[in-house]
Image (cartoon, rainbow, N blue to C red):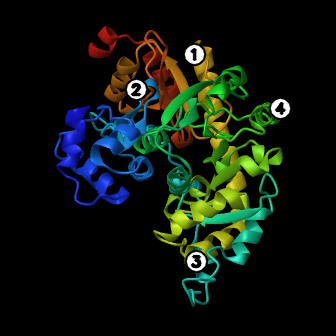
């Protein structure tokens, strides 16, 4: 411990909280302090450096907020691990060879997106803001959003897509060392983001109607700071939470100092009705709805609702960056939501995605491959050997995503999976399903000897 304090003291320029935090950061940058190294107790640092415990505590808070250090249970305060941001997401999208049918992306079919021409031609003025202080949400868009919002929300923000919302929320409300409960399997970019924040991520399995409530209840004594869920069309499983499961989950979380972060990434193309725990515990819920899969990824728009107490720090975090989402893009989305032909196209796309999914799932079942979930663009296919399944399909010109990047933690002996974006299977559903079924039973030897 003395060596640690000496390395900090050598780099200390000013006996202030900021100066001490900078000294610790320099020691880490110089590799004198390494990820996992334990820091001395606050009182000892204060005595050795002749500083007040309050000052040292303030320095530790600065370092914790930046993700430099973290509380590590019985080990005390340690240097946070160096993050490798995007590792899961990169693995999920990696292709080893060219393919003719890419079912690995999870993106919508461009042919099912509504055309923008009519709405764009109707924009007769740019509607540029007259001030940086203008309301960041256009009244027209707010009115359209609230028409089918799943509960009466106190405040509403418009942000640049669901991942922008998740980035803002986790940056504003979570601290290194916080316990965060997520679905397992989950969405790789979200898992990357949470790991980058330095939080303690715990996965809870899903059944056909949502999170395992017994597992959630068992975690409550550990005082989770947040629970992150996808209420419908969960990626990758396609599970949609039932209203009964949502009500019971809300009952478990009511009164706990725990934020529920809902990522409705499927949005309007989901066949399940809008759902939010905000209907029961609105003071604890932040609900995100993305319009990327329904109205176009390049619009980069999602809406975020919640109580003022939770929205205020998110709004402040956003004010330090881009401030607001382009009002021009907001006008485009408002126009699309109002347009009768656009609504018809979205309804048609929703039905077509459901049809494509059902055709593939039904054919897989004929081969004895049962797929859970009922909604969304993707299916979660159990396979004998994950790597072998991916390799076999790639050799036949089909790309799918290996399941491991979606797992919160690797469980020895657990069943492998691949994620398949059935929303992109325009034709030949039986043939595609037949190849997937064969790959599901493939082992390493059969994959290599095709």
Q: Residue at x 71, y 62 (%)?
A: 308
Q: Nearer the viewer, mark 3 or mark 2?
A: 2
User: Dot 1: within a 10 Å radius of its alpha carbon, few (fewer than 14), some, or many (20 or more) residues?
Assistant: some
Q: CA distance from mark 1 to mark 2?
A: 45 Å
Q: CA distance from mark 3 to mark 2?
A: 49 Å
Residue 37 position (above or below residue 156) = above
Q: Answer with the quarter of the image where residue 359 lies.
A: top right
Mark 1 vs 2, N-terminal side: 2
Mark 4 vs 2, N-terminal side: 2
Foreground pick, 347 / 12: 12
Q: Residue at x 58, y 77 (%)?
A: 327
Q: Is residue 396 left or right of residue 338?
A: left
Residue on which the image places disc 2 = 75
Q: CA distance from mark 1 to mark 3?
A: 47 Å
Foreground pick, 32 / 125: 32
Tell me the SS state at disc 2.
Answer: helix
Residue on which the image places disc 4 = 244
Residue on which the image places disc 1 = 369
Q: Is residue 26 left or right of residue 44?
A: left
Tell me the SS state at disc 1.
Answer: loop
Q: Residue at x 63, y 69 (%)?
A: 333
Where is the C terminus found, in terms of image quarters?
Answer: top left
Mark 1 vs 3, N-terminal side: 3
- The image position of residue 167, as x and y in percent, is 50, 53
Residue on which the image places disc 3 = 327
- The image position of residue 43, as x and y in percent, is 40, 39
Tell me the SS state at disc 3.
Answer: helix
Foreground pick, 436 / 381: 381
- The image position of residue 323, as x and y in percent, is 52, 72
Q: CA distance from mark 4 to mark 2?
A: 41 Å
Q: Is residue 406 left or right of residue 314?
A: left
Tell me, yes or no, whether the two marked residues, 3 and 4, touch with CB atoms within 8 Å.
no
């Amino acid at each position: 411990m003395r060596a640690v304090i000496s390395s900090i003291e050598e780099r200390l320029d000013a006996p202030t909280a900021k100066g001490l935090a900078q000294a610790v950061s320099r020691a880490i940058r110089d590799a004198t302090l390494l990820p996992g190294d334990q820091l001395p107790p606050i009182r000892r640092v204060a005595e050795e450096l002749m500083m007040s415990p309050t000052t040292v505590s303030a320095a530790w808070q600065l370092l914790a907020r930046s993700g430099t250090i973290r509380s590590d249970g019985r080990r005390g305060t340690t240097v946070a691990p160096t993050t490798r941001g995007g590792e899961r997401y990169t693995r999920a999208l990696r292709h080893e060879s060219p393919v003719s049918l890419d079912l690995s992306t999870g993106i919508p079919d461009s042919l099912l997106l509504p055309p923008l021409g009519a709405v764009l031609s109707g924009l007769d003025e740019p509607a540029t803001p007259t001030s940086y202080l203008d309301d960041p949400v256009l009244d027209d868009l707010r009115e359209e959003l609230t028409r089918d919002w799943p509960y009466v929300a106190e405040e509403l923000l418009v942000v640049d897509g669901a991942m922008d919302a998740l980035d803002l929320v986790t940056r504003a409300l979570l601290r290194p060392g916080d316990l965060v409960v997520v679905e397992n399997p989950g969405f790789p970019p979200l898992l990357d983001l949470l790991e980058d924040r330095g939080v303690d991520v715990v996965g809870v399995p899903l059944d056909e109607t949502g999170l395992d409530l017994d597992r959630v209840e068992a975690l409550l004594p550990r005082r989770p700071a947040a629970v992150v869920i996808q209420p419908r069309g969960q990626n990758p499983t396609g599970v949609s939470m039932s209203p009964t499961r949502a009500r019971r989950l809300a009952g478990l979380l009511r009164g706990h100092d725990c934020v529920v972060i809902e990522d409705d990434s499927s949005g309007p193309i989901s066949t399940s009705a809008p759902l939010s725990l905000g209907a029961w515990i609105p003071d604890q819920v932040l609900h995100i709805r993305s319009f990327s899969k329904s109205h176009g990824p390049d619009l980069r728009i999602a809406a975020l609702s919640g109580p003022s107490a939770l929205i205020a720090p998110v709004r402040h975090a956003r004010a330090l960056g881009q401030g607001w989402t382009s009002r021009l893009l907001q006008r485009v989305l408002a126009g699309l939501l109002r347009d009768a032909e656009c609504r018809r196209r979205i309804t048609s796309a929703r039905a077509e995605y459901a049809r494509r999914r059902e055709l593939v799932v039904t054919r897989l079942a004929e081969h004895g491959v049962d797929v859970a979930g009922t909604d969304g663009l993707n299916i979660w296919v159990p396979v004998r050997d994950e790597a072998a399944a991916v390799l076999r399909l790639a050799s036949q010109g089909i790309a799918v995503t290996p399941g491991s990047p979606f797992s919160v933690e690797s469980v020895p002996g657990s069943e492998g999976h691949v994620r398949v974006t059935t929303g992109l299977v325009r034709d030949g559903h039986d043939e595609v399903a037949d190849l997937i079924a064969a790959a599901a039973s493939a082992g390493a030897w059969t994959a290599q000897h095709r």
